[in-house]
Every structure is written in structure tokens, then in C-alpha cells.
Amino acid sequence: MKKRVLVLFSFALLIASDILAQDVKGKIVDKSTGGPLQGVTVNVKGTKFSTQSDASGNFSVNAQTSGTVILTVSSIGYKTVDIAASGANAGSIELEPITSSLSDVIVVGYGTVKKKDLTGSVVSVKGSEVRQVQSGNAMTSLQGKLPGVDVVTSTSTPGARPQVTIRGNRSITANNSPLYIVDGIQYNNFQDIDPNDIQSMDILKDASSTAIYGSRGANGVVIITTKKGVGRTKVSLGAYYGGNEVAGYPVPMSGPQYVDLKREAYRTAGRWSSPADDKSIFTNTLDSAAIADGASYYYPGYLITNGSQQNYSINVAAGTDKTKVFFSYGFFGQKGLLSNDYSNRNTVRLNIDQYLTSNLRIGLQSQFTHYSENLRSDGVMNVANKVIPIYSPYNPDGSLAQFPGGTNQFNPMFDDIEGNYVNDNDISRILTSVYLNWAITKDLNFRSNLGITKANSQNGYFSSALTIPRSTSSGSLSSIANVNGTDVNWDNILTYQKAFGKHNLEVTALTSYLKSTVESSSASGTGQLLANQSFYALQNNPTNIAVASNYVSSTLLSGAFRVNYNYLGKYLLTVTGREDGSSILAEGNKWQFFPSVAAAWRISDENFMQKTAVISDLKLRGSYGVAGNSAVAPYSSQSNLALVPFGWNDAPSLAYALSPLTANPDLKWETTATLDFGFDFGLWKQRVSGSFDWYNQTTSNLLLQRALPPTTGVSRVTQNIGETANKGFEIGIQTVNIQNKELTWTSGFSFTKNNEKIVSLVGGQDDVANGWFIGSPVSAFFDYEKIGIWQTADSSQAASYGRKPGEIRVADINGDKQITAADRTILGSAVPNYIFGFNNELKYKGFDLNVYLYARQGQMFVSQYALKFEPNAIENSANVDYWTPENPTNSYPRPNVNISRTAMPFASTLGYVDGSFLKIRNVTLGYNLSAKFMDKLHITKMRFYMSLQNYFTFSKVKDYDPEGAGSFERPLSKLILGGINIDF
């Protein structure tokens, strides 16, 4: 009976639930067009029940209740919404499209353009992307993220700027750095810009996009736009602090290892056979005790410390309909890996935009930057790796030993004593620009930009007699140097825009004036008796008082035009021309015209593409243009006179003589012609988007400093000689992998492959002395090829080459059975075969995670550590696997007391190292407080984060970050930091 009742009760519940359950129906439409949306996901929140809309936008989903339900409606390319539905009909639900990146405004030369209307090769990043990797300067933050842009950090020197090139090296001895434009004004000190002040960055790469800058844009252009005021007051605070440590440093031989090296070196010469012979080779009175005790002192370890990095910023944006103001202050401090090695930067920015009338606007962009630095000299770590490690750096009384063990090797720890070594930099730069913008008519606009940059720097230097730089000289050295520079940049731009039915036309005409002036002076002396007077009392130096001053000025005048035309918004054409006149070049060659043309076809806007669901954007584009470069020192076309002391008739005299650089009255423009083909694409409503570019650029009439025979009386001349070429392709892809209300995962991938080579040189021949080789990159390594060490079994063959077992074996390239200079070959280059970056950003509820990978593959560098093998054990050596009869390795040759490193045959071949690497460049985990909690604090945003930078590197190089290019002096560091951002 009870079972029957239970069955009937369960059956009644099922009937009741079926009666209560209902299907909720509705229709999904596009908010902007009103059209139906197919394939939209509709989920009953808190349940597993969901469905998708049909071709008419209609849907029906089982709600499993007759009460109010929450429907989560989501679709790629649209904002996800929650809709409360009570009853069976949810009605019409509008989805708002997410703004497409195609409508983003890109800043190009002297104007802006929508991304979809670009005809040139441009990559754009937002300020938020710049700040994903916390750094003192924006270019370091973007390392590996921009296709075609190579950013290299090879030193840990505080405040150092990275080396930046766009699409390879064009010049051999002239400047290859891109042009930097900050709010319309040329400003090459990009490291001054606080990343927190950046609104966007646009990098112009091909000749079409850079041609409007003429000679200044030959190496690419980086346009930085800073933040402006907003309609309501917004205050943002940011702070982070982190500690860094060396990212790997190779350790030289320990004390016992050095002892074994010296024994083997004498054993090779037949002067040692067992420890019983130690007294004949270790002749220092301290040696026997040190050897018996196993004494070992790691001198680099006494110098390398942990550093730090910190940043504090505040910015305020406010305004009304007529006035917009942005103010910021930032402090960035960096302490290096050596003691008393630091750089502190303070920046203040004020941007004001003011409407005087409805069509007349004026504005001010101003920035003040001040650096206070003390930078250690190069050479300290090199010496630290030389000191024989069995000798203590301290005397028995605890004081520092000037020459440990009584040798001639100076103790590098003296440079750490406060006041012994001072290299103080005090730098101030002011960038101020004002503009007037007059909308003359609806179609005609005039803008005038006037920018003035003032730079003042002072370097105070003092090196006491007890420092490495003066250890082989007499007395201290004191000096002071002052440099004052002024740049004036005045541009006047007239823009006409008009739509004629299906035709759209924009014409830009401009004039530009740029003048640069640098004044410098210096004074020095030796023998300062009181170290605490440092460089402040040069008159108290008793000897070698010297003074010098200099003045350098250059001017660039330009006129340019650009015509943008499109038909139906899908057939695009850009024609640009610029005439530049540079005072640096010779008379008759100062002026040159630089043209370019570009065209694009928006295939995705064609009628036949409208029914294609996969392709949401497709644009083909091509460009060709010529740009110039005059980036050599002013007065390079002239001969200069210098006062030279000489002796005549046993009496000292002075006379004017030609400087080492002689005149070239024919000096003219270096020019780069670039052909570029590319396409931009978007798939599945921009869920996958990106671009591809192939380019071929040739630089001719290179501005090259050519060496001259001594018989000419001068050493070099700057001439237009030679040709280089860069050919390659670039890929940039962005994907939206997951996008819903709680989880978003986006990725970005960049790939750059550039083949750089020298096409021609003087006389059509290689310049071996300078290391320039036709068919190879500018930075190529030309040497013998080490293939191992001659082994005992190869004694006869080794003897035929004049070698013996235990010595370096190199390849007989030409097969003539002898090793001569003709067997040298190109071993590799500092230029990588390719570069790629892979960025991933995940957001889940209040959490965000950024993981970024960066790689350079196929590059080579010369390792100072790999070369630090001392076969005669005259000083400490790298801890390497050297050959002995009992250890027939192929790595390093046998030690030999009779051969120094400089005299060892083929010693240079030991230094070439495969510098390829893959890094997890950045890992950042952040958390945003919930809106409910922030409302209680009366703030709009609060985010905490922690970051690991440069912590994980994978390469063939042990105990060293290969990005540091093999230097002993400034090993790179890895950083862990924590920070907070607050918006009010």
C-alpha cells in the first residue's frame, strides 16, 4: 500500500513539474541595424539549459519554471547581456555590437585615419597594452609584440634605453634609429615619456606611411600620443615596487680549479709532474697555505648585488565642453646590480586643450623630465673575473688589499668604496609644444604646431688613484662636462576634406622647420689631493688641466603634400611627396624630393562578399616609395681645423691642422626605396584578425665613413658609397579564444623575418678591416671555423697543418691542406633569422592573467666569458672543459704556460656562441576589487597585481642571459614586483 502511494505521489510531482515548466520564446536582433541575429546562445542562468537562435533570430528554451528566469544572451562580436523573462515570451532582445577595431583612429603623419582606410603598413597599440609589462620606457614594454620592430635590451645599466630598429639596419655607420614623434613634435628621447601618460602608439613602417616625414622617416616612425583631459574629473594613482637579481652570471674558476689549470699549463711545458713540483710553479709566499686550505674567493660575487625598481604616478584628467586638462607626475627609480649604480627619473606633464570659439582651438603639451644618476664604469666586472681566486681581497688586518696576493691585479672592490668613483649625471629636458587649430570651413582646416625642446646635462666625474680606471695611471682624474641643446620644430598643416557623392578626397599640404643647436664645454685635471673635493674643485688638480668647448648646429627645411582618395570607401589611393633640404649635406646636394604611392582594395566591402559568414574583413594593399637619410654628424661635408701641439727645433709649438675627418664636397642624401605588399583580414566577426606584410627595401648612396691611407694626412672621410638591402615578411594575429560574461581569453602573435645584407661596397670588394662583407648582414662574424681540438689519434694530420694534439682545430675551407687567411668564412651574424612573440591575456571574474613569450632565433654573439680562457694561467680563467691527455675534449685547448691567450692560434674562435633564446618575458597576475566593495570606498577601480619579468629563459647558453650579447660588465636582471592601481 505504501509503495502504491509513493508511486502515485511521484507521478503527481512529475505532472506538476511538467505543468509548471514552460518554454521561453523570443527574438534576437542587432541593436544598431535591427536585423535578426542567427546563432546567438541563450542560456537559462544557473542551469544547463540553453539553445541558439535560428536564421530569423527566433529562439525557444525550456525554462523549467513558470516564474521569472534570467536569460544570458551571448554572441561573438556583441556584448553579453542578462535579461529577466517572466512568462513565456521574452520579446525582442537587442544585442549591442562591440566596437570593431576597424573603426579605431590611427595617428599617421600630420593627421589621423580610420584603421579600415589605411593604405600603408602601420601597427597600433593602446596605452593599456604598453602598460601590460611594467617598465621605465614604452619600447621595452613592447619588445617582441610589434611585427617588424626589433627591440633589444643588452645591458642592465640603470636608465639605459633599448636599441630599436624597424625592418633591419639600412645604414652601416649612419644612424638606424626610428624617428619619434610625441604629440606632433620630434622628440628622440622616448625614454623620458612615462608609460602611464601614453594614450596610444602608432608605428609607421613602409614608405607610404613614413614618406610624409621625408628624410626623418627613413628608418621608420614611432608616433606617441599622450593622454588628454576628459569631460568629468578622473584621478588615477599607480605604484609598484620590485626587487631584481642577476638573470645568470657565469662563474670563473674556483681556487682549486685555478690551481689545477696552472699545474696543467706547466705540465704541458714539461715543468710539472706532481704536487711535489708545486713549489717550483707557485712561488708566492701565500700559495702553499692557500693550496693546502683549498682557498677560493669569488670576486664577481663581492660586487654583484640585488637591485630594485620602483614607480609612483598620479594623473588627473578633467574638463568641460570647452576646456580639457590632463596633469601627471611620475617617479621611476632603478638601482642596478652594482653598488652605487642608480638612475632616478621625475616627470611632470601638463596638457591643455581650449576652445576659444566653436571653430578655433588652442592647446599646450608640456613635459619636464629630470634624471639624477650615478653609473658605474665598465671594466669592473672584467677585472673581477681576472683576479687569481686563491688570494683573499682583504689584508690580515681586515683592510682591503690593493693587489691581492701581492700580484699586479688590482682589487675591484676599491671601486665600491663611497667617493672613490663618481660618475654623476644631472639631466633636465623640457618638451613644450603649442598648437592652434582653425576649422576655416566645414571642409578646410589649418593647424600650426610649434615645439621647443631644451636639454641640459652635466656629467661630473671623479676617479681616485685607488680605482680600476686609474690603477695604471698617476693620481686621480676629475672632470666636468656640460651640454646644452635646443631643438625648434615648427609645422604648419593645411587639410582639405570633401565628399563628392561616391568620391572622398583629403588633401594635406604642410611646411616644416627644424633647427637643432648643441653647445658643450668640459674641463679636467689629474692629481686631486683631497678625494672629497671630487669634481667640484678642478683648480686644485695640480696637473693636466684641460678645457674644451664646442658648438654644433643643423637645420632642416621641408615642404610636403599628401592626397588620400577613395571611391565607395573600398578603393583607396594615397600619393605623397616631400622635399627636404638639410644643412648637413654639401652645397648642390642639400635638397631632394621623396615620393610615394599606395593603393588598397577593401574586398570585404564588395557585394559578392556580403554572404560570406567567415570573412568579416579583407583588404589588399601595396605601396612603393623613397625616403632619405642625412643622419651623420653636422659638418661632415667640411674639413675642420684643430690645434695640435708639436715640437720644432727643440721647442714646443702649436699649430692648426686638419681633423681626422676630411671634407667631402659631394656628400648627398642616402636613400631607401621600399616596395610593400600586404593584406589585413578578419574572420568570424573579427574573432580572428591580423595582417601580413612582405617588403623589399634597398638603401643606396650609403653615408659611410671610409678609411683613408695614412699618406693622405687624414684618417677617414664620409662618402656616399655602397648599398644594403632588407627583405622579409611580418605577421601579426589577434584572436578572441573565449568570450563570455565571466571568462575572456585573448591572444596576440607576432612574427618577423628580415633578411639583411650588404649589396655593394667600395670597389665592389669586402671590407675585411671593418668587418663588412657583401652578401652578409652589417653585423657579421668573419673568422676561422672551429671544428674541435686536435686529438692524439690525429697527430700525423695535425702535424701536416703545423699543429699538435690539444690545440684548436679549424676547418680547411678551401681544401688546400693548409690553414691561411683564405680559410676564414662568415660564421654567423648578430641579426636573428626570425623573432616572434606570443601574448595571452585571460580575465575571469575579478582576476586577470597575462603571460607573454618572446624569442629570437638564429643569432650569434661573442661571449666574453667563452673567450676568458687563460692557457698560461697568468690570471683566472673561465670554468671550461679544457683538453688534457686524460680528458680528450673537443671544447677547449690544452693549457700551456708558454702561450698567452693573445698568442694562442685561433683563440678568437672560442668566443662565438649561438645566442638563440626563448623567454617567458612576463607573467602578471592581477585582481580587481568587486564593484560592490569599491562603491563603499567611493572609488571606481582598484587593482592589485604581481609580476615576474625575464624570470625564465631557455637557450643553449648556460648561466647567462643571451640577450646581454656576451658582456661581462652589465648582465641582465630578472624582476619580481607588486603594484596597485586606483581610479577615482
Image (spheres, rainbow, N blue to C red):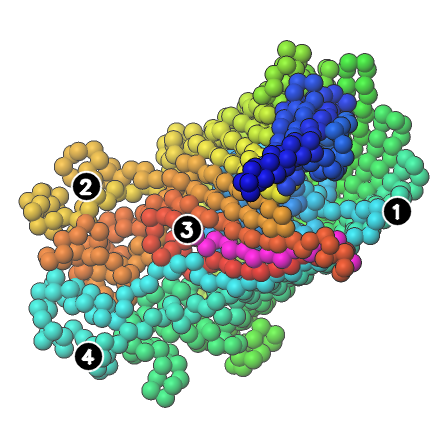
As drawn, the label of residue 865 is none
Residue at 42 percent across and 30 percent down: it is: 760
- Label 4, label 3: how many angstroms apart (C-alpha)? 39 Å
Decide if residue 598 is in sight here: no
Specify few, some or many for label 2: CA neighbours under 10 Å numbering under 14, 14-19, or 20 or more: some
Horizontal side of 738 relative to 77 (left or right) equals: left
Please name the residue that numbered disc 2 is placed on. 819
Q: What percent of the width, then of the height, locates residue 840?
A: 53, 42
Please name the residue that numbered disc 4 is placed on. 292
Q: Marks 4 and 2: which is nearer the front?
A: 4
Image quarter where the N terminus lies is top right
- Label 1, label 2: how many angstroms apart (C-alpha)? 79 Å
Of labels 1 and 2, earlier in sequence is 1
User: Main SS of the magenta segment?
Assistant: strand
Decide if residue 24 is in sight here: yes
Of labels 3 and 1, earlier in sequence is 1
Q: Which residues are magenta?
A: 938-953
Q: What percent of the width, then of the height, locates residue 744?
A: 60, 41
Disc 2, SS: loop
Of labels 4 and 2, earlier in sequence is 4
Image quarter where the C terminus lies is bottom right
Please name the residue that numbered disc 3 is placed on. 953
Disc 3, SS: strand
Amino acid type shown at disc 4 = Ala
- Label 4, label 2: how many angstroms apart (C-alpha)? 44 Å
